[in-house]
Every structure is written in C-alpha cells, then in structure tokens.
Image (cartoon, rainbow, N blue to C red):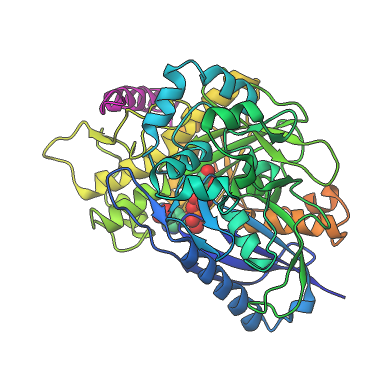
Amino acid sequence: MADFVGAIDQGTTSSRFMIFDHDGNEVARHQLEHTQILPRPGWVEHDPVEIWERTNVTIQTATRTAGIAPSDLAAIGITNQRETTVVWDPRTGQPYCNAIVWQDTRTDTIASALERDGHGDLIRRRAGLPPATYFSGGKVRWILENVPGVREAAERGHALFGTTDCWVLWNLTGGPSGGIHATDVTNASRTMLMDLETLDWDEELLELFGIPRAMLPKINPSSHPEAFGQARTTRPLRTAVPITGVLGDQQAATVGQVCFAPGEAKNTYGTGNFLLLNTGTQPVRSEHGLITTVCYRFGDSPAVYALEGSIAVTGSAVQWLRDQMRTIRDAAESETLALTVEDSGGIYFVPAFSGLFAPYWRSDARGAIVGLARYHTNGHLARATLEAICYQSRDVVEAMFQDSGVHLDVLKVDGGVTANDLCMQTQADILGVPVSRPVVAETTALGAAYAAGLATGFWRDTDELRAHWHESKRWYPRWSEQRRAEGYAGWQKAVQRTLDWVEVP
Ligand SMILES: Nc1ncnc2c1ncn2[C@@H]1O[C@H](COP(=O)(O)OP(=O)(O)O)[C@@H](O)[C@H]1O
Ligand SMILES: O=P(O)(O)OC[C@H](O)CO
C-alpha cells in the first residue's frame, strides 16, 4: 500500500516537491529557485521551460533522497503561484513568450481602460475581482495583442493558456503527446474570466477580453479522483501516479491550515502576503477592497468561497534589501540588522513596487521611504521593511473585519517570512492580536497533498486533517494601545504619500 502523498509547489521564487506521510508530517523535500526576469520597470517574467525542468528535478531528487519509490505515492497534488500566465504551442510544447508574472504591471492600460469604459462593475459582479494588472485575463490579452503570431495561432487552436499549475500538469501528463489541459476552480477564479456562481468561463467576459475559448483549460474541482489524469512521463517518475489535487497556493495554504469552517482565516507571508477568510458556500462581495475568490471545491461538493486580502510586496521587499540595496546577504539577516536599532526611528517604507493591491487597488502608487533624517541607518530601514509587512497585513485585517464582522482572536500564519521572529512579534504588536504558527509551516504543499489525498481516500475527511494541526509558536502583543494607534496612523499617512505617483493612461 502507498504510504505517502506528494505535492508540487510551483511558487513565485522557487519550485519544490514535498512528500508527506499519513499524519501530515514532512518526509522529504527538494527545492530549486528559478530566474526572476526583470526586463523593464514594472515587468516581471519567468521562463516556463526553466520552471518545468526544475520542477522535474525536484520530483526526482526528493523521491530519490527519501528512498521512496513512485509506487509508494498514493497521489500527487499540484499547487502554484496564481495568475502567472503561460501561453504555449501544444504541438511543440514551446511557450510563445516568457510567463507574465502576477506582479507584472504592463497591463495597466488594459485594466484602466476596462474601468474607464464602464466594464468594472461587470467584472466585479461576475468574477468577484476589480480590473487590475494582477489577474490573468489582461495578461492573456496582452500576449494576444503583442506577441507576433499568437492571435492567429490561438484562432487555429495552436495556442493554449494556463497558469503554472496547468502548465506543469500538461507537461507531467504527457506534454505534446496527450498532456491534459485542465486547471481547477481556485486558479480559474483568478482570471477575471470565470463566473463565480456557475464556476465556468463566462462568454461575456471572454468577449470583453477578446480571448478565444479554445485557448482555455477545462475547469475541474480542486480535488478529484480522475479529472487530472496521471503523471505518465518517463521523466520524472517512470510510473503512473494519479494527480488528484490542484489548487492555487493561497487556497492550498488555507486548506493546509485546516480553515474548513466559515470565519476561519490564515495569513501567508511569502513573496507577497495573502490573507484568506473562509466564508462558506456563498460568495461574499467586498465593500472594502478585498476580493472574492473560490477557496476550494472538493469533488462534487459545493464550492467554498473566501474573502482575500492580497498584498503584492512583503517577502520580496526583503529580497530587494538583499539583491538591489545589498544591505543584507540573506533574508534572515533582515532580523539581525533590524535588531541593531530599537525601532524604526519614525520612518515608514511603503513597498508599492507593483502599485498597491488590497485594500487600495492603486496601480498609480509607487514605493516610498518617508520620514528620513540624517540619523537613520540601514538598521532602521530593515525594521521599517519588516513593519511594512505587518502594517500591510493590518490594512487587510481591518478591511476583513469591516466586510465580514469577523474579529480574529488569533491570526494563523505560515510562509517563508514567518521564520523571522522579530517580524512575527511586530505583527502581534501592530495588530493587537496573538499570532500563531503551526508545526508544519509548509502549509501550501501540505494543502495540495490534502486535496490530493482526500480524493483517493488516503485521508477520510476534513475532521481527520484537523487533528494533524499543532501549534509550534505563538507571539503575544506587547505594545501599548497608544503606540499601536500612533504607529498605524503614521502608516496610513505614509501610504497617502505613495498614491498618484505614476500616470496611468
Ligand atoms: N528569515 C526571514 N526574514 C524575512 N524574510 C524572509 C526570511 N526567510 C525568507 N524570507 C522571505 O520569504 C520569501 C520566501 O518565502 P516562501 O514562502 O518560500 O515564498 P514563495 O512561496 O512566495 O516563493 C522571500 O521573499 C524571502 O525574502
Ligand atoms: O508564490 P507565492 O507564495 O508568492 O504566491 C503568489 C500568489 O499566489 C499570487 O497570487
């Protein structure tokens, strides 16, 4: 009998393959970064071939080092950076251009024209999203309009669109020789092309974006015993293993954090931050700058929805300190550098590199450091960077409360940045709410494994999964109410300084 479930986590900065046992414990992992291609200000690209090849290596390496045969895997789940858009030729498997990453702002004219021409309400109502550069629909349209030959190819059925789950799935199930072109409801809910109620591509939205339906993948539930086929390629597994779970990484983390009841929420701190609140089987429309998204759909059960606060730049601001400012050598050093000073010395860093996402949705914003005096050092900047991660999260927690009335007694957290003790303490201080991290912090891969394992009966039900969740650490607020209020007022003032900076036509 197969004792393990595997999960591919194709993230923004890296791809990894992880193997979990029946208790949800990690047995093995391998992880490889891929190149961040930054050809112009605001443009962010990935090479899809590099992503697929590295994903492939991680599967081989993790299974080999763990001494696990493919036949020991009951199933595989796939989770992914959402919205990032790949368009490829199904005859050759070659992408027509680099993937356009979710952070890329080149589609700002498309997004603003949709709003200006009065289509914003339709997109919000039907897809639950504001017209923004973030989502896939505008990126597909940009490729159709700007990459020579793609529109003609698409009309002849020679161009497929997919987010990276779909790209990896297609390659894993055979590529040009019969690869499965499918995605799941959570990923489809990030395109501006899917109707949140019918869970199908919407003809009116497709027409608005000028996207031929033939390019689009089939939309499946997030967990299903047959819909995603089998990993069949001679590489990397040499044995057919069923792929039975697919879901976007933030939804997967919500599943990995066992937020299965309405009112349960988690905040993931990776390249960006994403706070998702389970709202049950009815979509809740936001009035305060959050988006409505599908949280998961298991088999034929009704879809479960979430309200989401998406923040574009959090961990990537730490990467910016490392790679562009060169004030630190690795991400962990952001903590030691910040600890060289007692506080941020009154400065605020608003890392609006991709404009501002939730709750502002302002593509005309750009990053700013405000309040500088000659006194300030790299230590203050490091602290302001960590505080910016936490203040942006407070913004979405406030919006979440206004939209849903849900007051969090504790914030469940996960993701790479949660290794930073100072940042998590600061989060508790800025929110005035305790922050709790689970033992298995890789909740994204775990959630994909759960979706896959539920479909095959490896796990019985969500109650069984709940029993796997254990807290590893909790941070309690220490700041006075006055310090918290003054700090947040300063943040709100700093955000105002970043708005209306670039002209968006
Ligand atoms: N100790 C740390 N302190 C602050 N940031 C960190 C730390 N370790 C990792 N990070 C940040 O976390 C991010 C990676 O987290 P991860 O969850 O792997 O992200 P993703 O899934 O988006 O690729 C990077 O942006 C990195 O800068
Ligand atoms: O890959 P991550 O963890 O940065 O997540 C990216 C999000 O899915 C973007 O919506």
Depth check: 249 or 48 in front? 48
Depth check: 209 or 70 in front? 209
Could you tell me residue 51's position as x and y percent?
50, 64
Q: Is residue 159 visible?
A: yes
Is 484 positioned to the left or the right of 30 in the image?
Answer: left
The residue lying furthest to the left in this view is 374
Residue at x-position 44% and y-position 38%: 390
Residue at x-position 45% and y-position 20%: 115
Could you tell me residue 87's position as x and y percent?
52, 52
Is 347 positioned to the left or the right of 276 in the image?
Answer: left
User: Which quarter of the figure is the N terminus placed in?
Assistant: bottom right
Q: Is residue 431 above or below residue 99?
A: above
> Residue 386 colored magenta?
no
Residue at x-position 85% and y-position 40%: 301
Image quadrant assignment for residue 75:
bottom right
Could you tell me residue 202's position as x and y percent?
66, 31
Q: Is residue 419 visible?
A: no
* Region rendered in magenta: 479-505
* Ligand 1 falls in quadrant: bottom left
Depth check: 62 or 90 in front? 90
Image quadrant assignment for residue 411:
top right
Q: Main secondary structure of the magenta part?
A: helix
Q: Is residue 434 above or below residue 25?
A: above
Residue at x-position 83% and y-position 57%: 225
